[in-house]
């Protein structure tokens, strides 16, 4: 008897091709990459939620404002802050994607983010492994002086 597709559910259940659904014929390697273990490029990336900026909650914005020294916050500030944050992140991520595509990579590294922030005029310090000083100083025990 041929193996059947997993029917546990989860996020991939709704996006499966119709032949992979429960009760239908199984074709080996269908919907998989060349090795049969990884998902192809079209299913590799999840759909981005349209209102994901709502994940930046009101208390989170309030904490950021408190850190900046703000005492009182108007009610309209929260949506305005979300829109400014969204546009800023769009610019940074767009530049990060340019760097990643140039390297023919699929992973955004800390260097990509550092270079993107530097390019838009908002440099950030202390995260680059090439320029960061070694925080752990190795102390060697002093050798006693020896007289001859």
Image (cartoon, rainbow, N blue to C red):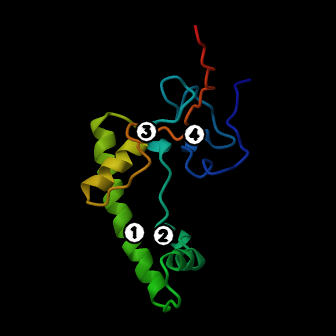
Counting residues from the start of the chain, the first of labels 3 and 4 encountered is 4
Residue located beneath label 3 in the image: 129
Counting residues from the start of the chain, the first of labels 2 and 3 encountered is 2
- Quarter of the image that includes the C terminus: top right
Q: Nearer the viewer, mark 1 or mark 3?
A: 3
Q: CA distance from mark 2 to mark 3?
A: 30 Å
Residue 27 in the image: state x and y as whole percent: 58, 29
Counting residues from the start of the chain, the first of labels 2 and 1 encountered is 2
Residue at 31%, 60% in the rendered image: 122
Q: CA distance from mark 2 to mark 1?
A: 7 Å
Question: On residue 53, which mark appears?
Answer: 2
Residue located beneath label 4 in the image: 19
Residue 108 in sight from this viewpoint: no
Counting residues from the start of the chain, the first of labels 1 and 3 encountered is 1
Question: On residue 86, which mark appears?
Answer: 1
Residue 46 in the image: state x and y as whole percent: 50, 51
């Amino acid at each position: 008897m041929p193996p059947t597709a997993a029917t546990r559910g989860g996020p991939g259940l709704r996006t499966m091709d119709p032949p992979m659904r429960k009760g239908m014929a199984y074709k080996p390697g269908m919907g998989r990459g060349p090795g049969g273990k990884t998902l192809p490029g079209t299913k590799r990336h999840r759909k981005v939620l349209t209102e994901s900026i709502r994940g930046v909650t009101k208390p989170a914005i309030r904490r950021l404002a408190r850190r900046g020294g703000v005492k009182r916050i108007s009610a309209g500030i929260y949506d305005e802050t979300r829109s400014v944050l969204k546009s800023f992140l769009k610019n940074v991520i767009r530049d990060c994607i340019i760097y990643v595509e140039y390297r023919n990579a699929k992973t955004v590294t800390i260097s990509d983010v550092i270079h993107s922030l530097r390019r838009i005029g908002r440099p950030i310090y202390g995260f680059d492994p090439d320029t960061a000083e070694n925080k752990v100083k190795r102390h060697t025990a002093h050798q006693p002086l020896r007289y001859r």
